[in-house]
Amino acid sequence: MTYRREQLESQRRYLLTSKAFSPDARRGGGVFRGKARDFVLPSQFREENLFRPIRDVTLKYFSDHKISWHVARAHLLSSQAFCLNFLAPFAFQPQALKTLLQGALGFITEMLEVEPETDPKRLVAFEFIGNRDYLNEATKSRRTRGANCTSPDAFVRFTTPSGGREAALVEWKYTESYSRAKAEVRRNSVRLDRYRHIAIWEKGPLRSDCGVELVEFFNEPIYQLLRLQMLAKQMEKDSQLGIDRVRVVLIAPRANLDLHKLKIEGLRRFGIDVSSAWKALLHDSDRFVTYATEDLFRDSRAVPQHMPDLAAWHSYIGERYSLL
């Protein structure tokens, strides 16, 4: 049985038995891709896909910032919902967030506000796109967080023991897997126009000697990593943010073996899995970190016990996402 199938069956059981969902939500039957499905919440109960203590503040945050929800918002396997359920409870808890992230990011001195002008004291931003159109993606001079432009699932800033200021762009995966690469001539032409001048070192993150045509990178999940890595590079250069180093952090279940397989033949000489190949293709390999969801949940065990709703959160995340 595939990881996705295992998780789908587990989520179905959790939906039917957990008090995290109302009786009406438990019926499922929400529409996804034109068909009613038992693993999709009815649209009027889709907010129940979020851990109860974060619902109100998260819905307000998305509304205030006009952030687009992913199309799978009500789907039990939504990676966006998983990311929010995991990280949003830590968004205003500096010591807890610091403890949670140090395994992935190294020693942290202090967590920093991410959107001080609009959300004082917030330490985790979601679908963050930066101060300007770093990647030439705006259409009609407008950008929407979470839709039609590069938007990391989460964004954090912090200081290190050396006195530096760093940031992390988090790409959060769950049950995703990707088919083998295929050519998309029309879309690739647009992508080349946007990215050709900011992809290769020293204006971009990719090694100048890798000998790979840029279109080879326009296949998932490498394409997502490329865009995030270009965004990280441009944000590093933007002195307005006051950041010395920006890293891309891929958080994904170790158990999702299919996600980690590299299926782009032109890149397989750099590594047989996505993470090792991607690091080998970067000029600065330290700008990319991969960390298992299982390990991040393990790290949460060290979070100070006085954090609000911590025990309920451990139970919810562990049981719902099969991490216990």
Image: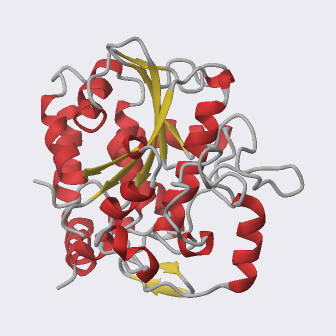
- Is 195 placed above or below 247 here? below
The one of 161 and 75 positioned closer to us in this rendering:
161
Image location of residue 59, percent across then percent down? 55, 44
Q: Quadrant of the N terminus?
A: bottom left
The one of 248 and 3 positioned closer to us in this rendering:
248
Q: Residue at x 78, y 65 (%)?
A: 193
- From this viewpoint, which residue is outermost toward the right? 140
- From this viewpoint, which residue is outermost toward the front? 209
The color scheme shown is secondary structure
Q: Residue at x 75, y 44 (%)?
A: 133
Report the number of discs.
0
Q: Residue at x 28, y 54 (%)?
A: 20
- From this viewpoint, which residue is outermost toward the left? 324
Q: Is residue 171 left or right of residue 26?
A: right
Image location of residue 28, percent across then percent down? 38, 75
Query: Is any atom of residue 119 visible in this view?
Result: yes
The one of 6 and 229 positioned closer to us in this rendering:
229
The one of 180 and 264 positioned closer to us in this rendering:
264
Q: Is residue 27 left or right of residue 139?
A: left
Image location of residue 36, percent across then percent down? 47, 85
Query: Is any atom of residue 27 visible in this view?
Result: no
Q: Residue at x 75, y 75 (%)?
A: 189
- Is 180 placed above or below 124 here? below
Image location of residue 75, percent across then percent down? 43, 69
Q: Is residue 259 left or right of residue 224?
A: left
Quarter location, residue 278? bottom left
